[in-house]
Image: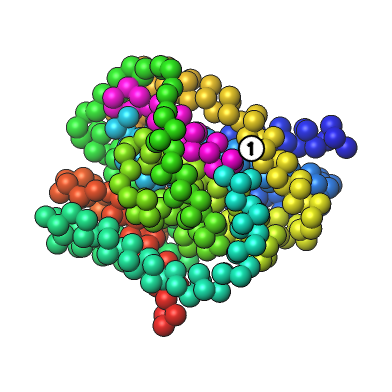
């Protein structure tokens, strides 16, 4: 039985690596396939738990690699393109990945540290959080718009346009609406701009990684406060949680922001399984898959935590070495060629999963993202594409 679980763990890590590295392929897709074939392949409950958990945790470690090196994000890594691309253009793409990896490792430590407190608090405060989240998101939106007084008018217009686009995409009844929406706003727009400006990717430097304990304090605090709450609500993604978390702790430098993104991304995924155990609410596709397979009990939760820990220990060196491979080779290929290839790949994936309507959303969101770059407005404002629909969802009078 132990040997079978080890094999399952390895297969889960392999699946998470593939979904993390290849843009547009998400763990939710693999989880859906697994649910449809679980009876056929005669997978035990423990094997299903190990596979899903190891795949999900691995994915959160790897999914920043295509975002940083290729400019191809998913909903959880969209904001990493902003500082990540700057690191890449300075020859420090690997350093950016290591920062997100640091955040992921930090989040696993925090998970074990806050589990007793979360176990006590969440069942008691969940009703209040559910009532107040919409108002808190309104405050976050106002802060995003007003933090740069000089560009408040154009920022408000772009914020509103992205919000309406998000509402349209999420209500379009297409498959995977976030794929064309976020790929256009954050990925394709950055790639098109790189082609237009003829960006040249310099040779990447792989130097000794250093991070001070002081730089970890703010991301750790923000992650601890925001992640368990974000894990409760399907509409609040890692990028939104990072925006909220960065306002909780005050201004973060680029290093701290990437650490925060990595830590929140992993902790939301990991804590979603704990939340599932506590209140039977599913925040992630992976947690939803578990809910459909088993009824969680004390034994299951022990297996989940053990799988999270073992997966982390295995995945850390794999992530580092994979990032090094990207770093050593990315400059050898003309970046415009890479950008065009990724644009074609994203277009193909979007047409396959989201159809013609998804492709139209992709085009419009790309234009809006390019507009942001041209007028000098921070692309973080484009997260209104998820903030506004989420706010409307959680306001009591909508």
Residue 113 appears in view: yes
The residue furthest bottom is 397
Residue 373, horizontal then vertical, whole percent: 21, 45
Q: Residue at x 52, y 73 (%)?
A: 128
Residue 66 appears in view: no
Residue 396 position (above or below residue 325):
below
Instruction: Please check the rendered image and state whether residue 104 is part of the magenta-colored stretch, yes or no.
Output: yes
Q: Residue at x 20, y 50 (%)?
A: 377
Q: Is residue 394 left or right of residue 313?
A: left
Q: Secondary structure at mark 1?
A: helix
Other residues around mark 1 within 10 Å, as few (<14) / some (14–19) / many (≥20): many
The residue indicated by pointer 1 is 15
Question: What secondary structure predominates along the stretch shown in magenta?
Answer: helix
Coloration of the structure image:
rainbow
Magenta span? 88-109
Q: Residue at x 42, y 66 (%)?
A: 390
């Amino acid at each position: 039985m132990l040997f079978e679980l080890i094999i399952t763990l390895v297969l889960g890590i392999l699946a998470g690596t593939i979904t993390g590295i290849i843009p547009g392929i998400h763990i939710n897709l693999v989880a859906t396939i697994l649910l449809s074939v679980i009876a056929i392949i005669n997978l035990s409950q423990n094997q299903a738990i190990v596979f899903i958990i190891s795949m999900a945790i691995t994915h959160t470690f790897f999914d920043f690699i295509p975002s940083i090196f290729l400019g191809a994000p998913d909903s959880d890594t969209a904001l990493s393109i902003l500082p990540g691309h700057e690191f890449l253009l300075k020859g420090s793409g690997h350093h950016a990945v290591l920062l997100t990896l640091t955040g992921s490792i930090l989040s696993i430590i925090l998970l074990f540290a806050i589990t007793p407190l979360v176990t006590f608090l969440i069942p008691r405060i969940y009703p209040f959080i559910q009532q107040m989240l919409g108002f808190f998101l309104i405050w976050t939106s106002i802060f995003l718009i007003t933090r740069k007084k000089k560009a408040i008018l154009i920022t408000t217009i772009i914020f509103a346009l992205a919000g309406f686009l998000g509402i349209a995409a999420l209500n379009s009844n297409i498959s995977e609406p976030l794929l064309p929406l976020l790929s256009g706003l954050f990925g394709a727009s950055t790639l098109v701009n790189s082609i237009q400006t003829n960006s040249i990717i310099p040779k990447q430097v792989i130097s000794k990684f250093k991070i001070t304990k002081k730089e970890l304090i703010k991301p750790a605090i923000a992650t601890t406060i925001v992640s368990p709450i974000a894990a409760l609500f399907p509409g609040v993604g890692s990028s939104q949680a990072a925006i909220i978390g960065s306002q909780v702790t005050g201004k973060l430098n680029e290093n701290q922001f990437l650490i925060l993104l990595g830590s929140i991304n992993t902790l939301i995924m990991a804590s979603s399984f704990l939340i599932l155990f506590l209140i039977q609410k599913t925040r992630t596709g992976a947690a939803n898959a578990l809910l459909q397979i088993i009824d969680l009990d004390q034994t299951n939760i022990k297996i989940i935590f053990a799988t999270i820990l073992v997966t982390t220990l295995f995945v850390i060196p794999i992530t580092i070495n994979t990032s090094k491979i990207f770093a050593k080779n990315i400059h050898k290929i003309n970046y415009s060629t890479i950008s065009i290839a990724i644009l074609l790949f994203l277009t193909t994936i979007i047409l396959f999963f989201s159809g013609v309507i998804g492709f139209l959303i992709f085009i419009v969101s790309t234009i809006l993202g390019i507009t942001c770059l041209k007028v000098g407005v921070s692309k973080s404002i484009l997260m209104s594409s998820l903030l506004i629909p989420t706010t409307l969802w959680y306001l009591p009078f909508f």
